[in-house]
Amino acid sequence: MMSGKNFFLLSISAIILLFSQCKTSDDEEPTGPQTMRDLNVPAGFNYNTSHNVSVKVIIPEGVPWRTTYVMSTDESNTFLKAMPTDSVERSMESYIHIPTYMDHVLIRYADGTLCETATVPVVNGSVEHTLTKKKFDATSLSMEVDTDGDHVIDPEDDYPNDSSRAYNIFYPGGENMKNRGTNVVIPWASYAFEDLWPGYGDYDFNDVVIDFYYMVVVCNTLFHGQYIVEVHPSYKIRAIGATFENGFGMEMMGIPHEHVANIQWRYDDGSWSDDFSSLLTEGYVSLRDNNVEDGQDDAVTIVTDNVENILPNPGGSSFVNTVQSAPYEPPVTIHLKIEFPWENRPFYGCSIPWYAYPWTTTALCYDDVNPFIIVDGERGKEVHLPDFPPTDLVNMSYFGTQNDDSDPATGRYYKSVNNLPWAIDISYSFEYPLEKNDIIFAYPEFVGWAESGGSVNPDWYLPEHAEESHVYQVP
Ligand SMILES: [Ca+2]
Ligand SMILES: [Ca+2]
Ligand SMILES: [Ca+2]
Ligand SMILES: [Ca+2]
């Protein structure tokens, strides 16, 4: 039987043991990064969650020229629609812009009755496939009508009565091949900004959260590629976790401002308008006649000069949709239509936008889209995605100050000395972190992704990888 004294000593030992165990687990905790600022990110990493992938498809002998579709393997998304580009090699060559985690795509020719539909791997940034001919009834093919004569048969033509338009092509992806009617489902992607640049912020990446998709209207040629007729960016302002009043704009890099004929905008339920005065109320943005921003060589559109005018503070709080207990404000979408000047003349089977001549879908691509915020009403203070250059109106004196380690001479922009960004482009409408919740706690897989330069956890931002207690939940 245990004496009172022994029991006392045993209890003390147990308490000491318990205490030392607690101490051990306390000691172990700080081994991981405690903030985003602790990360060691390779210098060349650009935080891309998506990338360009070249596509080459060989079409068998005896198969008529039809549209090739490149889709996600579950067929929920269409990344490309294109007619053949080489009659001798019988090939269709183009590119797609897809999430880096996507390792296979689906290739379908026409409606799938002429060639076998195939799942094809993405290897080293390219997709190559030789189609296999199916047995088909040639007499039924002669029934296919091309009403507008642009070489795209009516069932494949998004504009069957318009020879100057053939397809709507979407990033991050459009709905399935029947691309008309009211059942259009378009996925969104997200831009997320930190607004204390050139100083570090708290890396909750919710100071401005804007979802987006881009629709490009192309005209089709047979064997001469695709030409851009219009660009339709759509921006959904979801959250403002900031006290600053920030603007938002987008530069089309390399497109001279005079190559844009006009820009119009509308809300979801509104009609197209030339008048930007209700979006630009702060007095620091001036527009040219074609609604691009004045003072810029390239075509720059300012969507709003103060996101808070579009998505007001509910109940006077300075944060919108980043504090779970605060009232929810439904996101507001602004659609833009950027038109290129026209010269209506037949060219390889369609009418080509004149200035848009060089702007094939390979010449103007996703990598030329340069979104940015304008910080707190100061036109010269912009925050861009890492390694994207500022516009002509930026105040260059901020670069290299505080935590910014930009080097304009080498094209290094908006990165800190340990290569942290102030903005990220996520190829999915992500559940952004709650106010003042560091993204490395909201998305623990972000750490390995960033520190490996993107080679592991490429889908860190999908909802199944979110820590629910650290992300904002739409009520
Ligand atoms: Ca047609
Ligand atoms: Ca057409
Ligand atoms: Ca922040
Ligand atoms: Ca914030």
Image: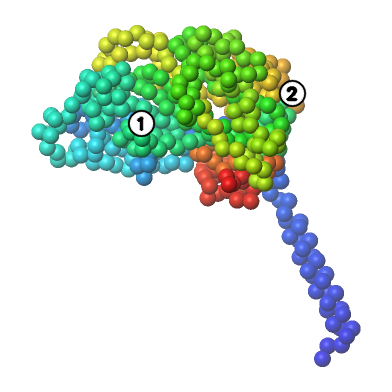
Q: In the displayed structure, does residue 280 sit left or right of residue 31? A: left
Q: In the displayed structure, does residue 347 sit left or right of residue 253? A: left
Near mark 2 (Cα within 10 A), the count class, few <14, some 14-19 or many ≥20, is few
Residue at which label 1 appears: 80
The amino acid type of the residue labelled 2 equals Thr
- Residue 57: x and y in percent read 29, 32
Residue 272, placed above or below residue 206: above
Label ID, residue 401: 2
Residue 380, placed above or below residue 152: above
Residue 365 visible somewhere in the drawing: no
Residue 370 visible somewhere in the drawing: yes
Label ID, residue 141: none
Residue at 31% across, 9% down: 344
- Residue 170: x and y in percent read 41, 30
- Residue 26: x and y in percent read 76, 57
Quadrant hosting residue 98 = top left
